[in-house]
């Protein structure tokens, strides 16, 4: 059964100016003539709508956004369009290329991820992965991060062996810039290696390195940072 109090909250949170274009009137008539369809998506949405409204209100956003899945998928989490948009929000493949979700496999690693987020929030550099948000999934803290490509530098080196001189120079400049930046801020990565280096740049654009995985990083000064070990594997 729909929660009348929840729907009142949604109605009170409307902030967008109402529109009455012919197209909108046409779709309003379509929905109003199908009460069975409305009942189905209201019943289906009752599983998710409370959580959606909580997150929308937390961010001070118009509550109209909470009803977007009505149009996108009728609150069907398994909806899949011919354009390969999927889920209640009909995300398309390109959405997944913009962000990465780091999830702890072991519940005991949650504190480490929170510490990693705290370090990353201090850093803003084009060659260092950025954390956008800490979210909770199944009672575990997860990090929403920059997407860093489909493969790491380790994958590239395994597939292609040595790098060209042009790539060696570019990637070397990228990594040196990132290491210098974090050392100036008294942050030590502690685990720089090819598998912790990804790539930025979209299809058709020049790729650059992105330093990843600050799970072992320390924000306090250390006597002898180990981050310079990268020089033995970059190119030969």
Image (cartoon, rainbow, N blue to C red):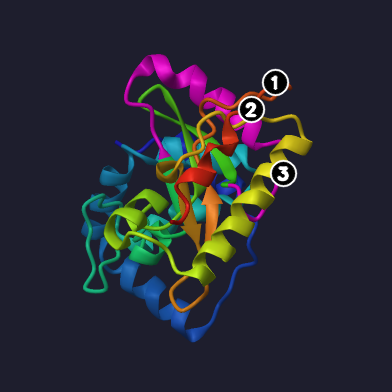
Percent position of residue 59, x then y? 62, 42
- Residue 180 can be seen in this image: yes
Residue plotted at (38% across, 61% down): 162
In the picture of the structure, the residue carrying the numbered disc 1 is 222
Percent position of residue 133, x then y? 56, 39
Q: Which residues are magenta?
A: 102-128
In the image, taking residue 38 as reference, residue 153 lies left or right, namely right
126 part of magenta stretch = yes
Label 3 crowd bin: few (<14), some (14–19), many (20+), radius 10 Å: few
Label total for image: 3
Between residues 219 and 139, which one lies in front from this camera angle? Answer: 219
Residue plotted at (37% across, 17% down): 107
191 part of magenta stretch = no
Quarter of the image that includes the C terminus: bottom left
Asked if the residue at tag 2 contacts the one at tag 3, i.e. Cβ–Cβ closer than 8 Å, the answer is no
In the image, taking residue 118 as reference, residue 77 lies left or right, namely left
Q: Which mark is residue 180?
A: 3
């Amino acid at each position: 059964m729909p929660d009348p109090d929840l729907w009142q909250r949604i109605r009170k949170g409307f902030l967008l100016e109402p529109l009455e274009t012919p197209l909108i009137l046409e779709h309003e008539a379509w929905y109003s003539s199908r009460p069975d369809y409305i009942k189905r998506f209201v019943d289906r949405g009752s599983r998710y709508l409370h959580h959606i409204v909580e997150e929308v209100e937390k961010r001070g956003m118009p509550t109209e956004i909470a009803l977007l899945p009505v149009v996108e998928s009728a609150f069907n989490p398994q909806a899949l369009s011919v354009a390969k948009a999927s889920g209640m929000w009909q995300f398309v493949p390109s959405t997944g290329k913009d962000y990465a979700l780091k999830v702890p496999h072991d519940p005991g690693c949650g504190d480490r991820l929170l510490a990693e987020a705290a370090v990353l929030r201090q850093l803003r550099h084009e060659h260092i992965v950025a954390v956008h948000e800490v979210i909770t999934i199944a009672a575990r803290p997860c990090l929403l991060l920059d997407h860093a490509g489909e493969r790491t530098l380790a994958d590239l080196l395994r597939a292609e062996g040595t790098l060209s001189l042009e790539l060696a120079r570019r990637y070397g400049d990228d990594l040196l810039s990132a290491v210098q930046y974090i050392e100036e801020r008294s942050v030590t990565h502690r685990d720089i290696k090819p598998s912790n280096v990804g790539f930025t740049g979209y299809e058709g654009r020049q790729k650059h390195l992105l330093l990843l995985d600050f799970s072992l990083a320390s924000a306090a000064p250390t006597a002898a940072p180990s981050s310079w070990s990268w020089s033995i594997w970059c190119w030969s």
